[in-house]
Image (spheres, rainbow, N blue to C red):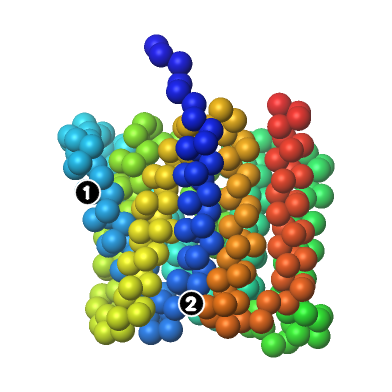
């Protein structure tokens, strides 16, 4: 077997492009939700993702792999599709429809901390005391972000929206736990299956609870943008970056630039005034995640 070919320059280029894309999606969420309800927006995004991934599989001659899948594999991805995109995006989009983007986006970043806690439940892993410290630090960050400049502002935010953000982190962490048991080796094929099944659920959901009235061109374009740059192309570029990097951990940590860059788009495009407590709270959350990851790496 030939050793992997590393190209750190290309890896950083792909990673930074992906981070730039991901830093814009919170703004796209809010634009899309101006005219569409959450299920309509994720339906448009999912249709876009499914079509894009189908084209990628077709062009790379990987479609025959779908015929080789077992019933167990299909059922597994049918369940994953229920978690993501169906449940996760409906919940997080609902949170974005209630809260300012600068509140919803950083709070959603706590999912790596939640993932460690849930690993204790589902994977029977032992949790270290420093993970509990990281959890409390990130919780402090959530409080700072939710205050929007001063603690008296708690009453101005809908607590339901904050709980939706926190709940979406549990859904996302659950998705990654169950995704770790995935036996479909090709990652693009696996992602296509998740979103294909998710599209089935979303079609049923939109028939039952919403409508196919996609009249707004700006919100429609936002949904298409999310399908391409939140999920489709960004996923491919990110996987490419990790595969080319000689040290994938350094590349992986670049993702934490995205929420800070996102605040710039939120401010200049959405016109939200960014509070210092948002920046401090986000710093708390990212620091907690990196603290936890550094500790795990040292002790492996």
Q: Which residue is at 19% across, 42% downward? A: 58
- The picture quadrant where one finds residue 228 is bottom left
Quadrant where the C terminus sits is: top right
SS for tag 2?
helix
**Could you tell whether 225 is left or right of 215 in the image?**
right
Q: Which residue is at 58% across, 66% downward? A: 262
Q: Which residue is at 63% across, 52% downward? A: 256
Name which of mark 1 and mark 2 comes first in the sequence.
2
Q: Name the one closer to the observer, 51 or 209.
A: 51
| 10 Å crowding of disc 2: few (<14), some (14-19), many (20+) | many
| 10 Å crowding of disc 1: few (<14), some (14-19), many (20+) | few
Report x, y in % for residue 48. 29, 61
Q: Outermost residue, top direction? A: 1
Report x, y in % for residue 85. 40, 59
Residue 68 disc label: none
Q: Compared to 85, does 274 lie above or below?
A: below
Quadrant where the N terminus sits is: top left
Q: Name the one closer to the observer, 179 or 29.
A: 29
Answer yes or no: is residue 222 visible: yes
- The picture quadrant where one finds residue 209 is bottom left
Q: Which residue is at 32% across, 75% downward? A: 220
Report x, y in % for residue 2. 41, 14
**Could you tell whether 265 is left or right of 72 in the image?**
right
Which residue position is annotated with label 2? Answer: 30
Answer yes or no: is residue 209 visible: no
Which residue position is annotated with label 1? Answer: 55
């Amino acid at each position: 077997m030939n050793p992997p070919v590393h190209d750190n320059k290309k890896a950083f280029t792909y990673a930074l492009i992906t981070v730039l894309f991901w830093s814009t999606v919170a703004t796209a969420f809010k634009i899309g939700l101006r005219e569409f309800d959450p299920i309509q927006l994720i339906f448009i995004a999912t249709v876009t993702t499914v079509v894009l991934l189908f084209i990628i599989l077709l062009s790379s001659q990987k479609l025959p792999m779908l015929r080789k899948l077992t019933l167990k594999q299909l059922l597994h991805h049918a369940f994953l599709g229920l978690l993501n995109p169906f449940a996760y995006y409906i919940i997080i989009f609902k949170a974005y429809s209630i809260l300012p983007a600068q509140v919803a986006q950083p709070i959603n970043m706590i999912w790596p901390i939640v993932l460690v806690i849930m690993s204790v439940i589902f994977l029977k892993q032992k949790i270290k005391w420093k993970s509990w410290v990281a959890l409390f630090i990130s919780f402090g960050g959530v409080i700072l972000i939710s205050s929007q400049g001063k603690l008296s502002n708690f009453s101005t935010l809908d607590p339901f929206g904050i709980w939706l953000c926190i709940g979406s982190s549990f859904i996302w962490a659950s998705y990654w736990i169950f995704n770790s048991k995935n036996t479909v080796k090709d990652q693009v094929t696996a992602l296509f299956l998740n979103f294909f099944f998710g599209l089935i659920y979303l079609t049923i959901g939109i028939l039952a609870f919403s409508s196919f009235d996609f009249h707004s061109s700006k919100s429609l374009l936002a949904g298409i943008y999310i399908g391409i740059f939140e999920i489709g192309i960004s996923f491919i570029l990110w996987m490419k970056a990790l595969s080319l990097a000689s040290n994938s951990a350094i590349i992986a940590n670049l993702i934490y630039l995205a929420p800070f860059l996102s605040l710039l788009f939120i401010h200049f495009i959405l016109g939200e005034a960014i509070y210092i407590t948002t920046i401090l709270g986000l710093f708390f959350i990212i620091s907690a995640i990196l603290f936890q990851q550094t500790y795990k790496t040292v002790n492996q």
